[in-house]
Image: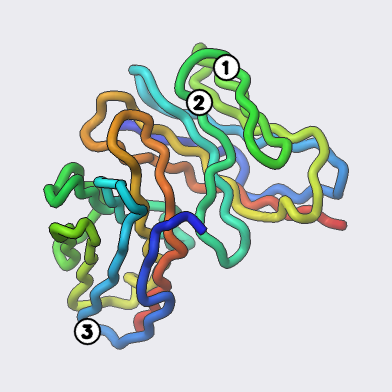
Amino acid sequence: AQSVSQHNHHVILSEAASLELGCNYSYGGTVNLFWYVQYPGQHLQLLLKYFSGDPLVKGIKGFEAEFIKSKFSFNLRKPSVQWSDTAEYFCAVNARGNQGGKLIFGQGTELSVKP
Amino acid sequence: DSGVTQTPKHLITATGQRVTLRCSPRSGDLSVYWYQQSLDQGLQFLIQYYNGEERAKGNILERFSAQQFPDLHSELNLSSLELGDSALYFCASSPPGIGGELFFGEGSRLTVL
């Protein structure tokens, strides 16, 4: 069965600090990978996605993620965080060809950015 | 605004009761997914429908059921409610084809007292 593991449950940073959130998945086949963000009281929104091609993908709001196939990882990065990045971040995987198209989510990482 | 509409936004009910959550997918999307988000379990996939047919099933309790109607809206029915069913229930939809990107609604927050 597919699973997604996010290394950090809660990360606290000061503004302008760099961010890296870890994500590892467990699945032997080809996958599509996603990072979603959930701002307080809001629904999940897509930050970025990887389907194929360049393993370094850029998303909205200055976020990027790198797919490393050999490590089954898809870490999220941002060079300089802002207070408005305070939110919960979810990594998700969809196994291509799986039944349906459901995403399997990690447990989420809560990011708190101090002004 | 994702285009996915969920009602009600908030619901408070008592143990043993039954509730129905409603979801309207984005225009053109055939797939509807239901997820449960709780503090201890995170985001758990419950069930998926595609064009009226059940496509995939996840960690959905037998007390819960869902359906997708011909107009593609979906309902999630939760019965014999327990305190532990208190959670945020998200609906998501996706367009036809491969990819897997889901568009989420704002959720229905269920509180069971």
**Residue under the image location 21 percent in, 33 percent down:** A99
Measuring from the top left, give residue A30's x and y in whole percent: 37, 18
Measuring from the top left, give residue A56's x and y in whole percent: 62, 20
The residues bearing labels 2 and 1 have C-alpha atoms spaced at a distance of 7 Å
The residues bearing labels 2 and 3 have C-alpha atoms spaced at a distance of 42 Å
- Return the residue nearer the eye: B67 or B84: B67
The residues bearing labels 1 and 3 have C-alpha atoms spaced at a distance of 49 Å
From what the image shows, is residue A71 above or below residue B43? above
Measuring from the top left, give residue B68's x and y in whole percent: 17, 58
Left or right: residue A95 versus residue A9 is left
Q: Chain of mark 2?
A: A
Left or right: residue B56 versus residue A70 is left
Q: Chain of mark 3?
A: B
Give the class, few, some or many, for how many residues have Cα within 10 Å of label 2's Cα (few <14, many ≥20).
many
The answer to whether tags 2 and 3 share a subunit is no
Element carrying mark 2: strand
**Residue under the image location 87 percent in, 57 percent down:** A115
**Residue under the image location 15 percent in, 60 percent down:** B69
The C terminus of chain B - image quarter: bottom left
- Return the residue nearer the eye: A92 or B6: B6
Measuring from the top left, give residue B103's x and y in whole percent: 43, 49
Query: In the rendered structure, are the residues bearing label 2 and label 1 in contact, judged by CB atoms less than 8 Å apart?
Result: yes
**Residue under the image location 57 percent in, 54 percent down:** A38
Residue carrying label 2? A50
Amino acid of disc 3: Gln
